[in-house]
Each structure stands twice: as structure tokens, then as C-alpha cells.
């Protein structure tokens, strides 16, 4: 039996870039395991460390990049998340002038959160873990995108449903896609309001497929019963507008509806949900039940409106 390819967390990048040398190559359908460092780069060992002492150039790294054989610009890769494992403790922090309450006065604070029995233990409360990948994406066509940002390439999207059993579809901009992932969370609520979730080290197991007849504008997440368009903008209003527009286009393609009919239907069956509100670009998702669309509905090659 062929050994599972494994990429150590030492193979880390801090930007998605077409210039990066691949850490590993995989064929479509081949399983690969990535070790992920926590978003603080392993710098926080206990609650005594001062946040201002952290090396901020070493945060939010991603393991990779992975060269996916056969992936070319205008293709789509399907990232199938087979497993997500997390360490037995994580870190959550609040940082002045960061997060949804950045205008409020508060002190910096770090908390180490034990993880056991399927729960994160916060003071006397416990929260069921939902291990998820916060940063996941591919290289842009030109230049580079820091791993702490998000966009059409993916990136630091912080979508709590990017977890075991889900499939993430990403547009390809450069040969091999140059995929990377990081910022693992043991659990995160929609919004990630305080600027961090339970940041944790761990390991993810993935496979990739290359879809030659599908070109998409934004990342698409597939869960058991829904598709979700993952968009971002300088404001929540802009992000929501982009997400609804993609949902409308998908419904038009799927059903042959007019723009007006598809727009009406979004008020009936498309849920808008917040991914995160703490980055300069805000992230949302438009969630559409599978009974109303297929993945082919998001193909942009034949759309004119």
C-alpha cells in the first residue's frame, strides 16, 4: 500500500503566490495530509505571554503550497475534506482596536482553552468542537495575497462549515493551483466577533479533483444538503450584494428564470450568513439548498446579463 503523502507544518507560507515553490505534488484523487500550526505560529505556550511580544510577521501561516497535477487557469479544483484533527488545547485572544467591538476600550487578553471529550472547556462552560479550516485557498494569477486576507482565491475566509465531509470548490488562476491551508479552529461561531476563534494546531487530510468544464467566480462550499457562495467586500453590504448576485445568476442558469424571478426567489430560499466581520474585507455566504441548484449552476462561461 502506497504511503500517504504528508506535508509538515514547517512547510509554511504567509502569502498565496504563483512564485512559490511547491512543497508537494499530488494527482487528482490522491490523499494528502497537511500538518497545520495554530494561527499564532506556535508562539503562545501559556497565558503569561504579552500580545505585543508576538512576532506578527509569523501569524496566520498556511501549509503548502500543493501543486495539483492537471490544474490549469480557468479550471476549478474540488477540495474534499476527509478529516480534521486538532490538538488538545487551543488559544483565543482579544486585542484592543480589533474585532466587532474595536471602538470599545478593553485590554488585551489571551486564554488557553483545554480540548477534551469533544468539547472546548472555557471557564465553567463547554462548547462542542467543530474543527474547521480558517484559511484555505490557491495562488492568484499575479502578485500575491497575504494568508491573512481573503478574496476570489479563497484565503482567510473563516467559514465554520469548511470542515470534515465538506467539499470546497476553488477557481484556478495559475498552473497547479498552488493550494495551501492553515488557521485551524477547534470551534468558531459565525462572525468570529472578537477577532479570534479557538486557534489550534492539527492535521487535515484532503483529496483534490480537477474540474475542466467548470469555471467559477467565487469559492463555492458544498455540504450535505446545500451549496454556499463565499464572497467578501469592504463592507457587509457589498459582500451581501455580491453573494446575492451569484445566487441569482445560479438560479437563472438552473431554471431559465428571468433576473427578476431569480431575485424574488432569493428571498424565499437563499439564506445570507456572516462568515467573519473582523478582517478589512467582510465575508458572507449565500446558502442555497441543493434541490434548487447544482454545482454546474455556478459555471460562468455561458452567462450574459
Image: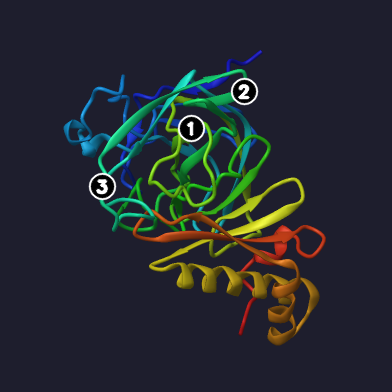
Please identify the quadrant where the N terminus is shown: top right
* Residue 41 horizontal side relative to residue 35, left or right: left
Coloring scheme used: rainbow
Image location (x, y in percent) of residue 190: 54, 50
**Residue 226: which quarter of the image?**
bottom right
Q: Which of 62 and 94 is in front in this view?
A: 94
Read off the residue under disc 1: 25
Q: Which of marks 3 and 1 is in front?
A: 3
Give the spatial CA distance, label 2 vs label 1.
33 Å
**Residue 178: which quarter of the image?**
top left
Q: Which of marks 3 and 2 is in front?
A: 3
SS assignment at label 1: strand
* Residue 240 horizontal side relative to residue 272, left or right: left
SS assignment at label 2: loop
* Residue 100 horizontal side relative to residue 302, left or right: left
User: Can residue 33 be seen?
Assistant: no
Amino acid at each position: 500500500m502506497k504511503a500517504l503523502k504528508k506535508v509538515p507544518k514547517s512547510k509554511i507560507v504567509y502569502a498565496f503566490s504563483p512564485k512559490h515553490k511547491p512543497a508537494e505534488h499530488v494527482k487528482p484523487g490522491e490523499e494528502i495530509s497537511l500538518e497545520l500550526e495554530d494561527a499564532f505560529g506556535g508562539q503562545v505556550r501559556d497565558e503569561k505571554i504579552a500580545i505585543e511580544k508576538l512576532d506578527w510577521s509569523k501569524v496566520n501561516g498556511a501549509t503548502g503550497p500543493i501543486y495539483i497535477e492537471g490544474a490549469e487557469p480557468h479550471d476549478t479544483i474540488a477540495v474534499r475534506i476527509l478529516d480534521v484533527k486538532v490538538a488538545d488545547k487551543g488559544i483565543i485572544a482579544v486585542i484592543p482596536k480589533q474585532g466587532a467591538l474595536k471602538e470599545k476600550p478593553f485590554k488585551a487578553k489571551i486564554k488557553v482553552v483545554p480540548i477534551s471529550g469533544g468539547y472546548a472547556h472555557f471557564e465553567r462552560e463547554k462548547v462542542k468542537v467543530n474543527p474547521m479550516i480558517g484559511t484555505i485557498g490557491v495562488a492568484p494569477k499575479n502578485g500575491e495575497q497575504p494568508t491573512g486576507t481573503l478574496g476570489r482565491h479563497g484565503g482567510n475566509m473563516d467559514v465554520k462549515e469548511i470542515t470534515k465531509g465538506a467539499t470546497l470548490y476553488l477557481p484556478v488562476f495559475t498552473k497547479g493551483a498552488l493550494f495551501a491551508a492553515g488557521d485551524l479552529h477547534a470551534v468558531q461561531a459565525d462572525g468570529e466577533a472578537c477577532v479570534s476563534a479557538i486557534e489550534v494546531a492539527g492535521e487535515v487530510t484532503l483529496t483534490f479533483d480537477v474540474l475542466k468544464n467548470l469555471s467559477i467566480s467565487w469559492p463555492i462550499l458544498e455540504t450535505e444538503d446545500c451549496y454556499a457562495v463565499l464572497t467578501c467586500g469592504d463592507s457587509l453590504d457589498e459582500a451581501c450584494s455580491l453573494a446575492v448576485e451569484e445566487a441569482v445568476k445560479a438560479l437563472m442558469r438552473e431554471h431559465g428564470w428571468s433576473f427578476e424571478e431569480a431575485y424574488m426567489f432569493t428571498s424565499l430560499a437563499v439564506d445570507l450568513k456572516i462568515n467573519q466581520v473582523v478582517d478589512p474585507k467582510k465575508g458572507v455566504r449565500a446558502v442555497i439548498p441543493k434541490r434548487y441548484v447544482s454545482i454546474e449552476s455556478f459555471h460562468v462561461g455561458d452567462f450574459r446579463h
